[in-house]
Amino acid sequence: MIRWFARTGWRHLIGVLAVVVAIFPLVFVLSASLNPSGTLTGSNELFSDTTDAHYRELFDDPLHPFGRWFLNSMAVGLATAIGSVFLGACAGYAFSRFRFRGRGAGLTTLLLVQMFPQLLAYVALFLLLSSFDDVFPAIGLGSRLGLVMIYLGGALGVNTYLMKGFFDTVPRDLDEAARIDGASHAQVFFRIVLPLVAPVLAVVALLSFVATLNDFVIASLVLNDPDKQTLAVGLYHFISYGVGRNWGVFAAGVLIAALPVLVLFQFLQRFIVGGLTAGAVKN
Amino acid sequence: MTQIPPTQPPHTPPGRRPTADPGHPPARRGLVGLAVRIVLLAVVDALAVYGLLALAAQHKWAMFGALLVGTVAVNVIYAGKRHVPAKYLAPGVVLLLVYQVYVVFYTGFAAFTNYGDGHNSDKPDAVAAILAHSETRVPDSPVRPATVVARGDRVGLLVTLPDRGVRLGWAGHPLEPVADPVYDSAGRAIAAPGWHRLSYAQIASRQKEISELRVPASEDPNSGSLRTADGISAAAYRSTLDYDRGADTITDRGTGKVYRPTSDGVFAADDGTRLSPGWKVFVGLDNFETILTDRDIRGPFLGVLVWTFVFAGISVAVPFAIGLVLAAVLDGKRLRGHRIYRSLIMLPYAFPAFLAALVWQGLLNTDYGYVNVSLLDGAHIAWLTDPWLARLSVLAVNVWISFPYMFLICTGALQAIPAEVTEAARIDGAGRGQILRHVKLPLLLTAVTPMLIATFAFNFNNFNVIYMLTGGGPKDPDAPIEVGSTDLLISLVYKLAFGGSNRQYGMACAVSILIFVVVAAISVVGLRRSRAFEES
């Protein structure tokens, strides 16, 4: 027994401790979302009683159209994730497979430009979108597409680096063989190289989806109509009206908002651990 | 399976065959691709032509030029068979140029201006606004029959002048003759092409807007305006100030005071009185100078700068230490259930950060939060409202958010270390501790340094955690600018630009530039270091 503890038991002890720290706030949110009291104070008794009232109220109250926010976030997030992966993959492929003038300088420039967070260019973005209003209102202020376009403006950069690293691990012999068999460069890209790195693409897409979901500043700048707002903007304003009062409804909203991401992370776990380090570890 | 083209190179193809179907035989190669390319290019060009026409109609020549250059470039790249790398880079680069490069340059430009409240347009606009502010009813001027008309959301005034016909104008758009107005029986114009008359009910519901409606008499700001008080008649108003275009001065007709333009973009008299609003002017390095030398601002700014570095540094170091220890302790090779541990410890990383911050804001609430009420048995600790405790809290929450990520990358990096390396060290007689310190740790550090730098840069600008937890507060009551004890530079920028009544875009842009320089320098130095580290 003592020997077991000395060898592996203490590891489990630390592991359990880490798990408790990691999941305790989430357990609290789950409990609060089911607790009939609905206030912050009443939620402090964990799992004393359960009800689904908060979940129903969440979708019924016209004052906070949670369903709309959720759909908006999903739509904006998915469009951004898919677009980012596609643009990043194209650029990464170019840097990985072609040799052209300005290649090295281009990579460095991309990284540097990306270090300027779009949040800091808030004023300029606002003016840019208002000048689009008269010509292309579809990507002007108040449009979800306009928001996606802003996010896609940041699609190159770190993504390009990551993707280039992944494409570099795909042997060039495959390209060569396909070219000899008569494939064009586009066919090599879409039908051979991309499928081989599909798991990685999924991870990059997921990370970009989460980054979009988390954005508060630019989303609140572009989307001025409550029906078009995203979860980050909506829930922030919802809770800032009074932390204690609608805590149960808020907790229900938090869980529903976080659930898709939590599930995806569990499914892609293996690739995430590999993907996070693959860009840096050289084989 | 595949047809080998007659121009087969002399060397034999590599042994490995692609697993995917390489597609069509060469004769049909790329037909689908060609069709897709033609359709997409046609759509892009159609949109571009529409945009060019619209921009030309609105005389927006800068945007017109940019769109024209972009369209030509896209056509050159995609029309032919050459420029293959550009074909892959173009879509991302176009978006990057518009939404990242342009806005960065604009921010850089605005940092050298006094752009902000009271200085947000050009000089002619400022003159017009100054004169409009000081308008009074012209004594004994005749009252004209007028009709309030609307087109879409816009309201205008349709004025019937007995000797000069019918005129129409709206806010910012001087009176101009109307081609064929519609008259009522009394000979008053009540509608014009594209404009319909507002009913009494509509006028009543938009009363404030209509009473503030100011229609300029002509392009010259000195000529005054027409306004309506009752919705059925209009009277002439004129400014008590005169703008002399030649001398570029504004004179008050009543007092005779003369206002001259100053270098900081306002009209000011010799006795120091200033007219509002001003206009945007180039102020050179004034903003930077103010931040670094102005006694009132320098103190808070330096405080925020130091705190930003501390916050970013601790937000990397502590989670990394925790993550490294956990990764070493829960090393999968020897531990049952390490998968389950990993799944559960990963949860805070998977949980969207803005939600985490909002949840912790509730947990740490002084009076009702779980931490005080249940864990600490009813203590009243001001976790988020005491300056030092608030700093501790945002750090603790950020550590909670980030340690799973560090755990994951350390786990990945440890697993990527080849077994032969540790085996060789063991044969050379190294103990487990020695292997960890002298073999595994250097290898791991090499692998994760780029991620550590990226995390530092990210936390340097971690707006969300701060804004959602404390809003940057608690506020510093002594500072002249709105700043709190947990504010990072980035939330300071946000407050300068959008917080409160006195918005200072130019100043905000200047701080943005400083942040950019700091983060870029750290990243470049860090990456260089890590490369040197790798080669040694």
Image: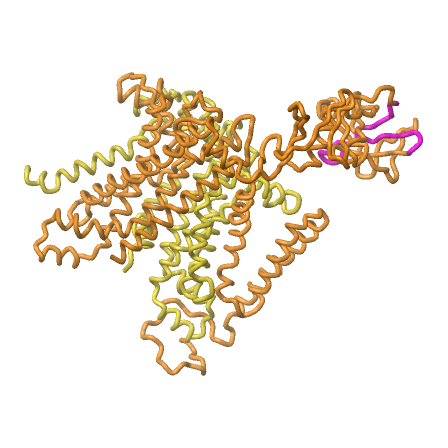
Chain colours: A yellow, B orange
Q: Which residues are magenta?
A: B142-164
Q: From the viewer's perspective, is A180 left or right of A12?
A: right
- Residue at 55% of width from left, 67% of height from top? B34
Instruction: Tell me how many marks there are.
Output: 0
Can residue A47 be seen here? yes
Seen from the viewer's position, the closer of residues B52 and B129 is B129
Q: Is residue B283 above or below residue A112?
A: above
Q: From the viewer's perspective, is B250 left or right of B527?
A: right
Name the quarter where the N terminus of chain B is drawn. Answer: bottom left
Q: From the viewer's perspective, is A14 left or right of B56?
A: left
Place of residue B457 in the rendered image (x, y in percent of width and height, measured from the top left): 38, 43
Residue furthest front as drawn: B270
Name the quarter where the C terminus of chain B is drawn. Answer: bottom left
Q: Is residue B202 above or below residue A204?
A: above
Q: Is residue A100 above or below residue A82?
A: below
- Give yes or no for residue B280 being in the magenta stretch: no
Q: Predominant secondary structure in magenta? A: strand
- Give yes or no for residue B154 being in the magenta stretch: yes
Place of residue A29 in the rendered image (x, y in percent of width and height, measured from the top left): 35, 29
Place of residue A253 in the rendered image (x, y in percent of width and height, measured from the top left): 42, 31
- Residue at 17% of width from left, 48% of height from top? B437
Q: From the viewer's perspective, is B101 left or right of B345?
A: right
Q: Is residue B233 above or below residue B341?
A: above
Can residue A249 be seen here? no
Seen from the viewer's position, the closer of residues B157 and B261 is B261
